[in-house]
Amino acid sequence: MKKETYASSGVQIDKAESFVERLKLLARRPEHGQLWPAAGGYAAVYPFAPDLGIAVTTDGVGTKLLVAEALNKHDTIGIDLVAMCANDLVCVGAAPSLFLDYFAVGHLENQSADAIMKGIVEGCDQAGMILAGGETAELPGLYKPGHYDLAGFAVGHVTRDKLITGNKIKPGQKLVGVASSGIHSNGLSLARKVLPQEDKWLNLLLEPTLIYVKAVLAALSKHGDAISGICHITGGGWRNLLRLNKEAGFTVTSPLLVPEVFHKISEHVESEEMYKTFNMGMGLALIVEKEAELVADLFKEHGFSAAVVGETTDEFERIRIKGFDFVLKDKHS
Amino acid sequence: MKKETYASSGVQIDKAESFVERLKLLARRPEHGQLWPAAGGYAAVYPFAPDLGIAVTTDGVGTKLLVAEALNKHDTIGIDLVAMCANDLVCVGAAPSLFLDYFAVGHLENQSADAIMKGIVEGCDQAGMILAGGETAELPGLYKPGHYDLAGFAVGHVTRDKLITGNKIKPGQKLVGVASSGIHSNGLSLARKVLPQEDKWLNLLLEPTLIYVKAVLAALSKHGDAISGICHITGGGWRNLLRLNKEAGFTVTSPLLVPEVFHKISEHVESEEMYKTFNMGMGLALIVEKEAELVADLFKEHGFSAAVVGETTDEFERIRIKGFDFVLKDKHS
């Protein structure tokens, strides 16, 4: 009876993707040619000076908001918000600097609002960013009592020689996986649909997204020449690996531990759909030409579980995972 | 029977302001000292190079969203979104460059989504920005059918010598007012409460916010030395003038034409509350040391109505308006 999919949870993935494609056509301007090509589209990088790229990205936390609300626990969702943006910035090699938040609510409540902002500030501290601004919007009539939405906006900087484009990714390089804390901030609509509505599971879902920034910056500083790609595993699950370079495939032979929450979800969802939707225990992955064990060790020194989990292959645009028959392809397949 | 106020429309202004004050204390870090002091807090300006300040700001469009929904007309609300951010950037002297949007919806509908993005792209074109990225979030369970929220993030750049700090504002300078197109994107909750729910009024409310960017950049290029302050009239109405420099007051002797929509609203709202909430026909104001008529003329050449409307006074933190007995003070008074 494994029949649930991300689509069946109410999220229209195909519709969203075709919308984004139409939008790209509509928004395209000659000035887009000035943007530096950055790996996986994790951030847009614009050169404000000949050797200074400013990287920008925006994200939200999806329906993890509704988990915070169900538990009436709001002091970590801001960490997720910062994490979703800051982890994206480092994927192009940028050092996060500034964060801004948009916080919209039907009726401002001091206690939850303060808790939300406490999380955002905590996230900024973890990511080494300053909270440079924000907008608090009280929108009676748009949000139901207790409901709110959050959007984050992050700015970082990178020089041209440190920019990660993904072009250096070749078959035969190592894949270093860094553990997630659980579901992070993607696939929550599906998880909420299939998990029992019990505090145990809700609390596991609310576990804040890990912020990998400081460890990644240390790895780039120490092993930058060896790192050809960095992949924040977000919406689309492990298929995010395929964003970095079309001329590479992946084989994962020694995956990291899969957290309990995913085992429970997988009682209702096929394995392939799991890997297409969730991070499955790997919140970040790095593709490295050499020094793979040293890169993994450095993440461990920063308190993360990490290991060499596989390598790149010449089976372009395909991901194989040991123990499974399916082959993951890009989002449009 | 003029008894409605912005507060009575469900927006808790005092609560929002005390929240922002608490937030400032919570978020303050030594690194905030690196930000350049920019007039009125319209944008945060961070020096990514010794003479290159990157200006960032975020905003939404408030419950103007619900007007678009009521009329099922979604192709201009994106112009408002860009306007709210881009007009803020120019107030610190920054040239807008990049825009990112956050678009959250319960259930993605092609027609309205495409219309919304068409407006955002149109706004970016008007402001001379490129749409560098965005996030489209489908959040079933958070937004009711047909509901959506929008947040905008804008990035600009300014050199230190062109940064507008407000410090050059002195008593005896001229105030140049530039006309709004109507209510723009502030005070909608109050306007929606008191106006008849008729298409005529809803259409007037939906009139897109003017984007002053190109005219302001031309004025800064031609009369930059004469311009001591630029004020985007947003939430808080004309009190925004008092954000720029505490050591100045204002007297408005020849106000611009007040659009019909404000006359209708004022049947239910006292005059002082009107000027504390709405732009009252003046969407932007510039404080100029000299060449005031030339600055006004330049805006007219760009298609805006503009005129010298008053001047700065030594009655610090006070605004007097010809024909009214009240005196506007800062937001906390």
Image: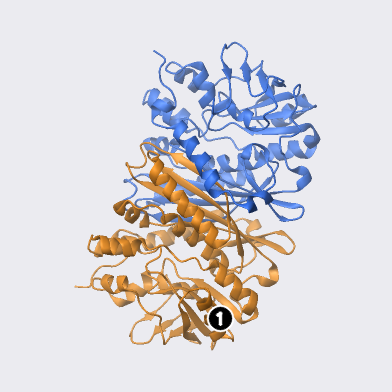
Chain colours: A blue, B orange
Residue appearing at x 76%, y 55% in the figure: A50
Apparent side of residue A34 relative to residue B264 in the rendered image (left or right): right
Measuring from the top left, give residue A181's x and y in whole percent.
56, 29
Question: Dividing the image into 4 quarters, which one contains the C terminus of chain B?
Answer: bottom left
Measuring from the top left, give residue B82's x and y in whole percent.
50, 58
Residue appearing at x 34%, y 49% in the figure: A142
Quadrant in which residue A331 is drawn: top right
Apparent side of residue B178 relative to residue B94 in the rendered image (left or right): left
Residue type at mark 1: give it.
Val
* Element type where label 1 sits in the image: helix
Residue appearing at x 22%, y 63% in the figure: B196
Q: Nearer the viewer, residue A256 or A73?
A: A256
Measuring from the top left, give residue A59's x and y in whole percent.
53, 43
Query: From what the image shows, is residue B127 above or below residue A276?
Result: below
Measuring from the top left, give residue A47's x and y in whole percent.
70, 53
Quadrant in which residue A176 is drawn: top right
Apparent side of residue A245 relative to residue B277 in the rendered image (left or right): right
Residue B217 seen in the figure? yes
Quadrant in which residue A275 is drawn: top right
Q: Which residue is mark 1?
A: B295
Q: Count of labels shown?
A: 1
Residue B91 seen in the figure? no
Question: Dividing the image into 4 quarters, which one contains the N terminus of chain B?
Answer: bottom left
Query: From what the image shows, is residue A186 above or below residue B244?
Result: above
Q: Nearer the viewer, residue B192 or B47?
A: B192
Q: Chain of mark 1?
A: B
Q: Dot 1: within a 10 Å radius of its alpha carbon, few (fewer than 14), some, or many (20 or more) residues?
A: many
